Image (tube, coloured by chain):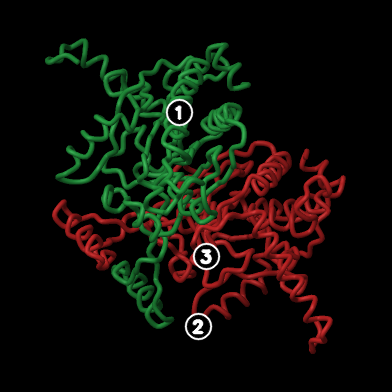
Chain colours: A green, B red
Amino acid sequence: MLAFESDADTARTDTAEDRLEALGRALFAPTGSNGVHARTALFETAIEALSTLITAHREADTEVLRFAPVMSRHQVEKSGYLHGFPHLLGCVCGLQGDEAEIHAAVGRFNGGEDWIDALRATDLVLTPAACYPLYPLAAARGAVPAGALKFDVESYCFRREATHEIDRFQAFRMREFVCMGSPRQAFDFRSRWLARAQAIADALALPYRIAPASDPFFGRAAKLIAQSQVEQSLKFEMLIAVRSAAQPTACMSFNCHRDHFASTWGLHTEDGEVAHTACVAFGMDRLALALFATHGLDLARWPQRTRQSLAL
Amino acid sequence: MLAFESDADTARTDTAEDRLEALGRALFAPTGSNGVHARTALFETAIEALSTLITAHREADTEVLRFAPVMSRHQVEKSGYLHGFPHLLGCVCGLQGDEAEIHAAVGRFNGGEDWIDALRATDLVLTPAACYPLYPLAAARGAVPAGALKFDVESYCFRREATHEIDRFQAFRMREFVCMGSPRQAFDFRSRWLARAQAIADALALPYRIAPASDPFFGRAAKLIAQSQVEQSLKFEMLIAVRSAAQPTACMSFNCHRDHFASTWGLHTEDGEVAHTACVAFGMDRLALALFATHGLDLARWPQRTRQSLAL
């Protein structure tokens, strides 16, 4: 964090860039789209080992659900995502007219013209976070029992990011554990996971820092909402050096939603109170990237502790 | 395949519907969107076991790549997918204007009005088949060596299906093995997989039928193109009874593309000829569904042979 760059600093920067380029070349194949990667076998080895490790830490009585990379647009709108993050949302559009209309659009394309004006929004969006489809699903089942509800969910997620650093994916896998229950149950769940996640990072020999955080809200009011989120300690992130120690990468997040999702979907506890929800989210691709950035590209040379934890 | 329905047949139909409903209830949780499912732990157990089994049959010298559920729109357009299947393609659209424009769209939504007119097409579409991103990627690397190239790819795929039977997913996982080489190499690769896939189905105790097939082309010319595809034996499918024996489900396909993708992307063999490509595709969700439809919902009561093959 120097105010002026010396020659030595410039050299260091070049080396860091070279290192990131080498990481990218070994872990991803180019796809012609920024922030969209083809994952290599090496990268997937880390993803699979991480998945198994996270599963081993799952609490008892947790229901497993795996979501698709698309979900109901109505649910995402109603959840407040469009309001908070309209710039990140991807909507599934298609050619939905009659046969003549679709033929006309394809004809325009064949003639070298643009056809995309004929696209119309469907009822689907790209899933923005793995737990968004869960709240309406759970609420439809009825009241949360006294012992709380716990879920293990995963989804490929999409965010229309404006920049494309190596740790900023447009399409990425998010694993989450989610709790629904009383305010105390939700808060304690997050506290347990804050401790457990640090034990996982230690077991992987990943240096990290836990920091208060806020979501990337859109527009003029963003700063105020984010500030209030930090003041209320609603979000923490686990930061790990991937690109650099000065700009660490959020690889996990620990979130108290209070009654946001439960109010939206009418999720109540058995005694009729509005439930609280909380989640811990693992950015699987970022965690795998953090492992390679920290320990190098040769799995055989990763620390003994890391290899043991990942059964490599 | 009776021409007339007797009372007994009607009863059988009801039972079949009940059976499919019970399957759906046990394997999927409702998401509020037709053809988009949340997968349960039971379903994922079969998916993971199938993945491992398919990997065990992978040929030597096969490169593994895992693609994202979104890919370059340009690549899909150029590959001919828009021309052949415009009705199935999902395009990623977003709010891409300046801050004022996005605020205006969100404001319309908050006011109970429609905001989707403000969506604009991005450079991404939903991946329609797992091998589409592969051809430009491989072509960019240069000529195909004399020994041919083999790939193992997988992706969540999307198709905007018009109907939503239990075996017709809008979002589904497709695993593929792909070969690029001489016409003989590509043809032999498909022949080997036609044999190997039948051995896999036998090992799973899944009754099946291999049938000539065609792709679901769009519009007036569809019938003609499909007929030519069948006449040239370019596509075979493995059909398994999921909904019914009379309407079996295509769970795998075996495809010779001839020089279609190679010509499009400039993929040549070392001696300068346009390459041929072929692929075998596993519909992972359909295969898992076929296992449950055939052997029931209780893994412990699946045939010994099936359990052994899947290491269950």
What x and y, as percent, mark residue B288?
A: 69, 53
Chain letter of disc 1? A
The amino acid beneath tag 3 is: Asn
Q: Residue at x 59, y 52 (%)?
A: B174
Residue B188, placed above or below residue A222: below
The C terminus of chain B is located in which quarter? top right
Which disc, if any, is residue A78?
none
Residue marked by disc 1: A188
What x and y, as percent, mark residue A136?
A: 46, 54
* Badge 1 and badge 3 in a common chain: no
Which disc, if any, is residue B220?
2
The amino acid beneath tag 1 is: Asp
The secondary element bearing badge 1 is classed as helix
Please tell me which residue lies in front, A100 or B183.
Answer: A100
The N terminus of chain B is located in which quarter? bottom right
The secondary element bearing badge 3 is classed as loop
